[in-house]
Image (spheres, rainbow, N blue to C red):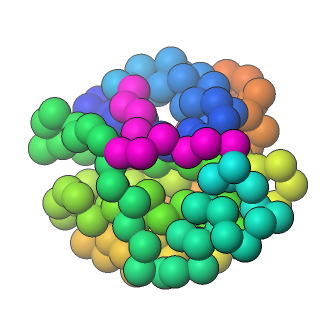
Amino acid sequence: MSNVLVAFFSASGETARLAKTLADTVKGDLYEIQPGVPYSSADLNWNNQASRSSVEMNDKTARPVIKNRVEDMTSYDVIFIGFPIWWYEAPRIIHTFLESYDFSEKTVVPFATSGGSGMGETDHILKQTCPMARWLPGKRFSSRANTEEISAWVKGLKM
């Protein structure tokens, strides 16, 4: 693969670990989607309906601000987008990321980490946010997935 970006959002470091392994495996550039206001432990308390993450996930129009930008998105043909699963889907900051660039003529592949839930309707939801991209099916991994597991998944993708 050439011109690959592995973009990820990681609230606790788990998705960051997986993204690094993926970037090393596909020899892609690594980019962290950083929130303008970092999430605290209290923000991530999914048991509290008033926590920041709960409020965002209950509002489908929420678009948390991203602190940084990809310097030259036009140079990438394939973008892997990683995130933790929140409430059976991607966090709202992933929608902010997808709405911030032109993904026409790009292949986008989601990947996720989760303590137990699967991808749910994530692929379908993200495609609605960014319909101009060519989407490949996403996959949920353990944050400790090894190079062999990730390589087998990537080889199975219809790039």
The relative height of residue 130 versus residue 53 in the rendered view (above or below) is: below
Along the line of sight, the residue nearer the viewer: 32 or 106:
32
Where's the N terminus, which quadrant?
top left
Q: Could you say where residue 17 lies in the image, as x and y percent from the top left?
A: 63, 26
How would you classify the magenta stretch by its main secondary structure? loop
Q: Is residue 48 above or below residue 31?
A: below
Position of 19 relative to 128 (above/below): above
Residue 149 in the figure: left or right of residue 73: right
Give x and y (percent) for residue 149: 73, 32
Residue for point 23% across, 40% down: 69
Look at the image and give the residue range highlighted in magenta.
30-41
Specify the quadrant of the image occupied by residue 76.
top left
Let me know if residue 88 is in the magenta part. no
Question: How many numbered callouts?
Answer: 0
Residue at image position (77%, 66%) is 48
**In this view of the protein, can residue 19 be seen by the observer?**
yes
Q: Is residue 31 magenta?
A: yes
Relative side of 70 to 120, left or right:
left
In the rendered image, which quarter is residue 35 located in? top left
- Residue at 27% x, 65% y is 99
